[in-house]
Image (cartoon, rainbow, N blue to C red):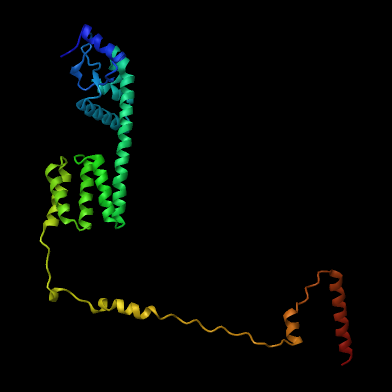
């Protein structure tokens, strides 16, 4: 029923100075709960956060607000949507007065939900990590902790239960695994989760195929593989013997050849000219001797 006149003023005064026994915040839960007498438009509602129903509605409003922010919608427009308007410019004077308070309350609630979700996801991630490393008992315990924090009826809660059942199966607790699948199949609100639980339960409850010894395939090479490994494990390649240094004593010719350095080319031009003259003289002298 719409509030007008003194009733509206009384509600506004309670928002301004709430009593000590109750904490009130301005938030719209339904446009018809409170309307401006001049424009017949929704402007706000006195909401006590102590009630379970009000808490759920506040949580849903915060989730809608956070989802809109992730999509890039203007924050003031998101608050206007909570107040029953498409744009912030369409808010009435009274709605504009409580817009910032409502926005701050939604931001605080959304941040609280984000932290709680991060804590739940962390336990779930740790459980999957332990499962991947073969620590099945530890992973089952972590999934139980994550499920206790998240609850069984959300999408994440359904995924946690499916992983929990896998951990039970790996631990040898097949009956507990089947019971988890049945519970999810019968009670979970998400159809995809229920279908997956039903398929996994069908696999678990399917009769196991029993093979007689003569029906099993035996590969002798694989059977003897371990024996071959053990036989070869003691064989190690031998290193070639290292040559021992002899006590051979070097002669002076050996030492001369090791320490000999060829003479470098002479770069002085006068020396080159003198060498040519001497060489020519020797050639002429040798010719005269013939």
> For this view, does 66 lie left or right of residue 238?
left
Residue in the image at 72% along x and 80% along y: 258
Q: 39 or 282, which is in the foreground?
A: 39
Tell me the quadrant of the picture where the N terminus can be found.
top left
- Classify 134 as above or below 59: below
Quarter location, residue 233? bottom left
Q: Eyeballing the image, is 14 above or below 193?
A: above
**Furthest-front residue in this view:** 21
Residue 92 in view: no
Q: Quadrant of the image for the C terminus?
A: bottom right
Residue drawn at x 21%, y 25% is 51
Residue drawn at x 26%, y 54% is 137
Percent from the top left, x then y, of residue 39? 22, 10
Furthest residue to the top? Answer: 5
Please state which of residues 246 and 147 is positioned toward the viewer in this rendering.
147
Which residue is located at x 24 percent, y 43 percent?
147
Instruction: Where is residue 76? Give x, y as percent.
Output: 32, 23
Q: Residue placed farthest to the bottom in the image?
A: 290
């Amino acid at each position: 029923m719409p509030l007008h006149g003194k009733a509206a003023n009384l509600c506004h005064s309670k928002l301004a100075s709430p009593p000590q026994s109750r904490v009130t915040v301005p938030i719209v839960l339904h446009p018809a709960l409170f309307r401006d007498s001049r424009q017949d438009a929704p402007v706000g509602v006195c909401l006590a956060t102590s009630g379970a129903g009000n808490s759920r509605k506040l949580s849903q409003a915060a989730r809608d607000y956070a989802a809109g922010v992730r999509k890039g919608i203007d924050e003031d427009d998101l608050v206007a949507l909570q107040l029953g308007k498409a744009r912030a410019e369409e808010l009435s004077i009274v709605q504009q007065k409580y817009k910032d308070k409502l926005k701050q309350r939604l931001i605080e609630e959304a941040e609280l939900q984000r932290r709680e979700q991060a804590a739940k996801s962390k336990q779930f991630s740790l459980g999957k990590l332990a499962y991947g490393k073969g620590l099945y008992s530890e992973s089952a315990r972590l999934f139980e902790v994550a499920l206790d924090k998240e609850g069984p009826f959300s999408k994440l809660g359904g995924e946690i239960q499916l992983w929990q059942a896998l951990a039970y199966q790996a631990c040898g607790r097949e009956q507990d695994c089947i019971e988890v699948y049945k519970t999810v199949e019968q009670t979970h609100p998400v159809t995809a989760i229920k279908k997956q639980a039903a398929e996994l339960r069908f696999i678990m409850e399917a009769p196991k195929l029993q093979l007689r010894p003569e029906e099993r395939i035996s590969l002798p090479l694989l059977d003897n593989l371990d024996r071959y490994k053990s036989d070869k494990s003691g064989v190690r390649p031998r290193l070639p013997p290292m040559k021992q240094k002899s006590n051979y004593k070097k002669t002076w010719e050996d030492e001369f050849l090791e320490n000999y350095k060829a003479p470098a080319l002479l770069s002085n031009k006068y020396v080159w000219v003198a060498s040519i003259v001497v060489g020519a003289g020797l050639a002429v002298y040798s010719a005269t001797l013939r």
